[in-house]
Image: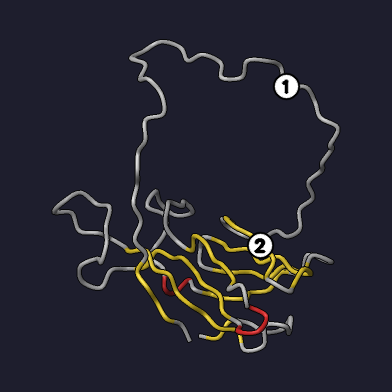
């Protein structure tokens, strides 16, 4: 079961310093940055996603990483072995992606998600998606007299048993 809400976004531009008409920009780093004592290494935890754009652990579930793929799939990745399962498939809700042609992506799709702070007891999570417009868009960043081809939607989803690793989102 899902409930949807239309998200409203505003863009605010702020001028931080004086405007420079032309010419090279000065180096903002005034001194050499010395190597630190902290060493890191990166290791892949999963593969086979198209355009992953966010990952986080759910409250109370440190054994899995939840990763959203712009194509509309929210994956649950078991960190111990990299096993990847579909936790939510919202792809049918999305506006078609790839305005640059097949295999291309733009600023639309499944763009984010968040777990409710009490997820372990209420099973709620939220997605932020680009969905087709039915009629006039509630909000658009398109120029006046230009029809919007999508609108941003925040949906609430529910998982029956959020403490069970086999549970998935209910539609």
Residue shown at 33% from the left, 14% from the top:
21
Label 2 vs label 1: CA separation?
30 Å
Against 166, is 83 above or below?
above
Residue occupying image coordinates x 59% and y 71%? 115
Foreground: disc 2 or disc 1? 1
Side (left or right) of 142 relative to 127: left
Where is mark 1, residue-wise?
Answer: 33
Question: What is the residue that sits farthest to the bottom in this orientation?
Answer: 160
Q: Is residue 43 left or right of residue 142?
A: right
Q: Residues within 10 Å of mark 2 (few under 14, many from 20)?
A: some
Residue occupying the far top of the picture: 23
Which of the numbered marks, if any, corresponds to residue 14?
A: none
Res. 64 image quadrant:
bottom right
Quarter holding residue 75: bottom right
Color scheme of the displayed model: secondary structure
Residue under label 2: 56
Give 113 or 32, whichever is nearer the viewer.
Answer: 32
- Name the residue at 34% across, 47% down: 11
């Amino acid at each position: 079961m899902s409930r949807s809400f239309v998200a409203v976004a505003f863009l605010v531009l702020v001028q931080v310093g004086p405007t420079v008409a032309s010419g090279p920009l000065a180096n903002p780093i005034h001194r050499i940055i010395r190597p630190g004592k902290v060493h890191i290494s990166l290791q892949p935890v999963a593969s086979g996603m198209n355009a992953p754009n966010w990952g986080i652990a759910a409250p109370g579930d440190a054994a899995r990483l939840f990763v959203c793929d712009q194509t509309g799939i929210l994956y649950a990745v078991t960190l111990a072995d990299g096993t990847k399962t579909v936790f939510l498939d919202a792809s049918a809700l999305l506006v078609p992606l790839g305005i640059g042609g097949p295999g291309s992506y733009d600023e639309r799709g499944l763009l984010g998600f968040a777990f409710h702070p009490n997820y372990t007891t209420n099973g709620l999570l939220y997605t932020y998606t680009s969905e087709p417009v039915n009629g006039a868009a509630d909000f658009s960043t398109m120029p006046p007299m230009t029809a919007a081809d999508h609108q941003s939607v925040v949906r609430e989803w529910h998982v029956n048993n959020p403490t069970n690793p086999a549970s998935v989102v209910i539609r």
